[in-house]
Amino acid sequence: VSAFVAQSIGAHFVEPPPFDLRACLEDSRAWTPLVFVLSPGSDPMAPLTTLAEQMGTKSALVSLSLGQGQGHHAEKVIRAAVTSGSWVVLQNCHLYPSWMPALEAILEEIAEMFAKQSSLDDAARRGGGDQQEANDFFRLFLTSYPSSDFPVSILQNAIKMTNEPPKGLRANLLRSFASNPIDDEEFFETCAPSRSDEFKRLAFGLGVFHAVVQERRSYGPLGWNIPYEFNESDFRISARQLRMFLEESEGQELPFSALLYTIGECNYGGRVTDDVDRITLRELLRLYLNEAVASQDDREVAPGFHAIPPGPHPAYIQAISKMPAIAQPEVFGLHANADLFKARAETNALFESALATQPRSQSGGSRSAEEIAKDLASSILSKLPGSFDLDSAREKYPVSYEESLNAFLVQELERFNELTHVVRESLIGLQKATQGQVVMSDELEALFNAVLDGRVPGLWMAKSYPSLKHLAGYVSDLFDRLSFFSTWVKDGIPPTVWYSGLFFVSGFNTCLLQNYSRQHRVPIDLVSFSFRVLERTEPVPIAPSDGAVIHGLFIEGARWNDDIQMLDESLPKVLVEP
């Protein structure tokens, strides 16, 4: 898609332009708010503070983070700034939705004030007018994540800006070296003479590290177990600490222990909550902050990305601009298959956005959307089995001290009955709505749109087991699960349990532990699982007396090697393996 856009209308449409806050400010007026639309990893305060310093108005910059109870203070600050000509920054407007109507009224009042003032004759104003007149240097900056509570009138009248993290290693490096403090010639060039070259090499390594931890987020759980909002402030403080530690240790060994702790544990690591992610972050940092990076100029810091020999700042910008625009997943320490995962996620996002713009009505000889939805509902209803008979299930599988799985089975059947009831009733309601027999409510309209788009309706997911499948796959999977439990009710505990087909997996695990604990008279808090992977062809005629034989597990990012009976690297272009 990027290549098509670049070829059709120009490459500059696929390359993010530099963030020019000064140009946005020059386009604004005192009564025009400037809205920063936030995204994960963006921090507009740093460029805003830098611009205020350059324009000599930093002392007149007032920042306030909105939250419960801050409305009165914010209004007071805005009214004072209107007359003094200060800049006001109201951060995180999405956190105070109840005050947004009041802000809307304040901005309307300010606009009327400036309109009234502009209508006065210049000579009349110079002749001793009101000393509380509005000041043309006043500016109001607002920051907010996308929110339905943000007033539409403010958005319509405002200058809207967003400063999303750049995509790609090269773009990230360019952003880091073109932003404060690295772009400050005095900061970059005046490190202690004996440390100057080492500082530049390590600063480049730090820039690569920052780009890598940012880009790994686009690979989903393969990159980080939890997506973290690393941003420019992390890089900025780390670069300043890097220079400070190098200058303080002049004549001594490079203080890598201090750097690894402050950068890896405090600056970046302070955002990381998962233990495995913390280990990954530390190891990535060791790749780019070490003795080899500090002393070698021809070292490959990442596949396809070589270190830049120490030189002036423009030389770094020029060298980075010549680097590959697209980095392979090996650059980020990932398997080549990770690129397929990323591409699939981006493709789904693109298609979902395109699908949202499509009309629901069709012309010509094709069937209408209502007819298609009605036929799909009828097809699903015709195949949907009836609810489980819970009374007979409880009679056949009573609550037993010796067999905890009896209670688990009945609870699973109850959950599936709730789900199938919602599916059945909602589809019947959809059929009636498409025929005009009942009013198309918001709930039914959401169901209607989901069925047409091939998505699982949110109404179903509220009662459903977790699933990432589309509608057709979800319905087929639901029928398979119902069939599995029907067999369980009819024939007893199956020899192998479909583990991923269970509704409440942790409940199944607890029942296995309870059974073992009661049979062997061992405290349950001392019991844990041990695992053995069976051969794919190994027969399992009956269920084991202790534990369970399960199937239905899948591995992403690795594979099970039957030959060596261990986890192994994934095969090329195979994302998930059983």
Image (cartoon, grey):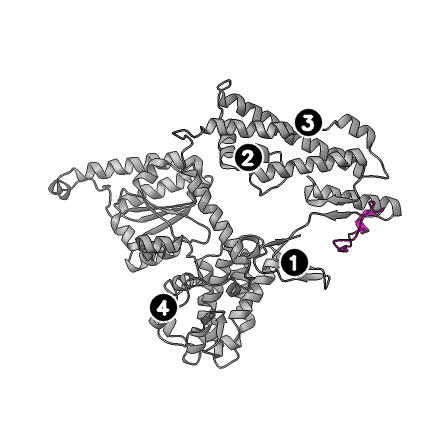
Whichever of callouts 2 and 4 sits on the residue coming sooner in the sequence is: 4
Between the residue at mark 2 and the residue at mark 4, the CA separation in whole angstroms equals 48 Å
Q: How dense is the environment of label 4, judged by Cα within 10 Å: few (below 14), some, or many (20 and up)?
A: some
Between the residue at mark 3 and the residue at mark 2, the CA separation in whole angstroms equals 22 Å
Q: Residue type at mark 4: give it.
A: Ile
Q: Is residue 235 above or below residue 107?
A: below
Between the residue at mark 2 and the residue at mark 1, the CA separation in whole angstroms equals 33 Å
Q: Which residue is mark 4?
A: 317
Give the secondary structure at mark 2: helix
Residue 200: percent from left, percent from top: 42, 73
Question: From which residue to which does the magenta span run?
Answer: 523-545
Q: How dense is the environment of label 1, judged by Cα within 10 Å: few (below 14), some, or many (20 and up)?
A: some
Whichever of callouts 1 and 4 sits on the residue coming sooner in the sequence is: 4
Q: Which residue is mark 1?
A: 559
Q: How dense is the environment of label 2, judged by Cα within 10 Å: few (below 14), some, or many (20 and up)?
A: few
- Which numbered marker is on residue 386? 3
Quadrant housing residue 376: top right
Q: Residue type at mark 3: give it.
A: Gly
Eye-nearest disc, 3 or 2: 3
Give the secondary structure at mark 4: helix
Q: Contact (CB < 8 A) between labels 1 and 3?
A: no
Between the residue at mark 4 and the residue at mark 3, the CA separation in whole angstroms equals 67 Å
Q: How dense is the environment of label 3, judged by Cα within 10 Å: few (below 14), some, or many (20 and up)?
A: few
Q: Which residue is mark 2?
A: 458
Residue 307: percent from left, percent from top: 45, 73
> At 24% across and 41% down in the image, what residue appears?
132
Q: Is residue 525 left or right of residue 245?
A: right
Between the residue at mark 1 and the residue at mark 3, the CA separation in whole angstroms equals 38 Å
- Which numbered marker is on residue 572? none
